Amino acid sequence: MILMSVLRDIFRGNRTVSEVPPAMAAAPAPIVSAAKLWTQTPAHDRHNPELLAFLPKDSRTIVEVGCSSGALAKAYKEINADCYYMGVEIDSEYAELSRRYCDSVLNVNIEDADEEAFGSLVEADCWVFGDTLEHLKDPWSLLRRIRGSVSPDACIVACIPNAQHWSVQAILNCGLFRYEDAGLMDRTHLRWFTRITIMELFQATGFEVIEILPRIFDEPAREAVLPAIRAMALTIGEDPDQAATDAMPIQYVIKAVPV
C-alpha cells in the first residue's frame, strides 16, 4: 500500500510527484522573490555535481544556456579559472545573479537570439544545458543551429529530466497529471524526453551521444511500482527489464559531440 499512500499525498498536495532526493533535502530556500515561483523555476545556489563532472576540464570557452544563479559557473571556475564562461539567461533577475560568477551574461531567450547575439557564442568549445532543453519550444532547431557553428572538437553537455520516471507513469495511470512549481512536473516544461528520445534528439540534430549517466536516487516507493511497469511492458511485447531500468532515473546527464 506504499504506492497508494504516495498517490494520496500527491492528490492532497502533501508532496510533489518526485520524492526529493537526499542530496537536495537540505536545499536552501529560493533566492528570488516569491512572485518568480509562478514563472521561472526557482533559482538556488546549488550545482549538479554529475553535470559538472561531464564538463571538459580544459575548456577555453563555455556557454551555459539557462545559467540561473551562476552556481555551475562558480563551481567550474574553481576547477578551471582560465576558462571564459558565458551565461545565457532569459530571466533578467536570474541573469543579474549569475553575473557574480560568469565572465559575461546574455539576458536573452536563446531561441530568439539574433545573429549578432548568437554570433558572440559560436566560439564556445562546450555548450551546457542543465535542465534547460525541456523548457524550449523547439530544442531541435536550436541544436541544429549550434551544430552549424561549432568546431568538430566541441561538445554539448546536458541534464534532461526523464519523462519515463516511475512516478510520472504512476500519476498518469491514475489521471493525476498535474503541473507543479519544480521537479519532473515543472509547469514551465514544454518538451518531454525519455532515454530513447534523448538519443534521437541528438542524432536528429547532427550529434552523437558518447556518454550518458542516469541520476537515480533513493526512492522507497519505487519498488511498489516497478512490478506494474514490468507487467505493462510484457503486455505490450516490450522488454520488462529495460522498462524497469528506464523508469528509475529522475534525469539523464549526457555528453554529445558533432558527427
Image: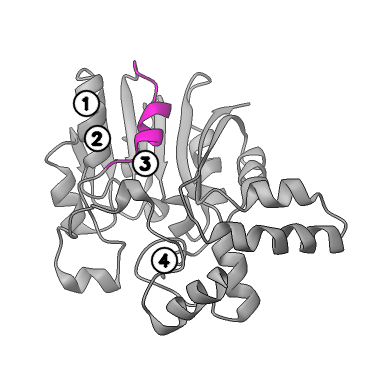
| Nearer to me, 162 or 25 | 25
Give the quarter of the figure containing the N terminus.
bottom right
Q: How crowded is mark 4: few (under 14 residues within 10 Å), some or many (20 or more)?
A: some
In the image, residue 136 sits, relative to residue 106, either above or below, namely below
Callout 1: SS: helix
Point out residue 70 in the picture as x, y percentages from the top left corner.
22, 42
Q: Which amino acid does label 3 sit on?
A: Phe
Q: How crowded is mark 1: few (under 14 residues within 10 Å), some or many (20 or more)?
A: some
Dot label at residue 228 = none
Which residue is label 3 attached to? 118
Report, in whole angstroms, how far the alpha carbon at label 2 lies from the one at label 3. Answer: 20 Å
**First of labels 2, 3 by sequence position:** 2
Q: What residue type is labelled 1?
A: Lys
Q: Is residue 192 visible?
A: no
Select label 3 or label 1 by which is in front: 1
Which residue is label 1 attached to? 77
| Residue positioned 43% across, 77% down in the render | 9
The answer to whether the residue labelled 2 contacts the one labelled 1, judged by CB atoms less than 8 Å apart, is yes
The answer to whether the residue labelled 2 contacts the one labelled 4, judged by CB atoms less than 8 Å apart, is no
Q: Residues within 10 Å of mark 2 (few under 14, many from 20)?
A: many
In the image, residue 50 sits, relative to residue 216, either above or below, namely above
Q: What residue type is labelled 2?
A: Ala
Callout 2: SS: helix
Which residue is label 2 attached to? 73
The number of callouts visible is: 4
Extreme-bottom residue of the structure: 12
The answer to whether the residue labelled 3 contacts the one labelled 1, judged by CB atoms less than 8 Å apart, is no
Residue 56 relative to residue 226: left or right: left
Q: Can residue 137 be seen in this view?
A: yes
Q: Is residue 124 magenta?
A: no
Which residue is label 4 attached to? 186
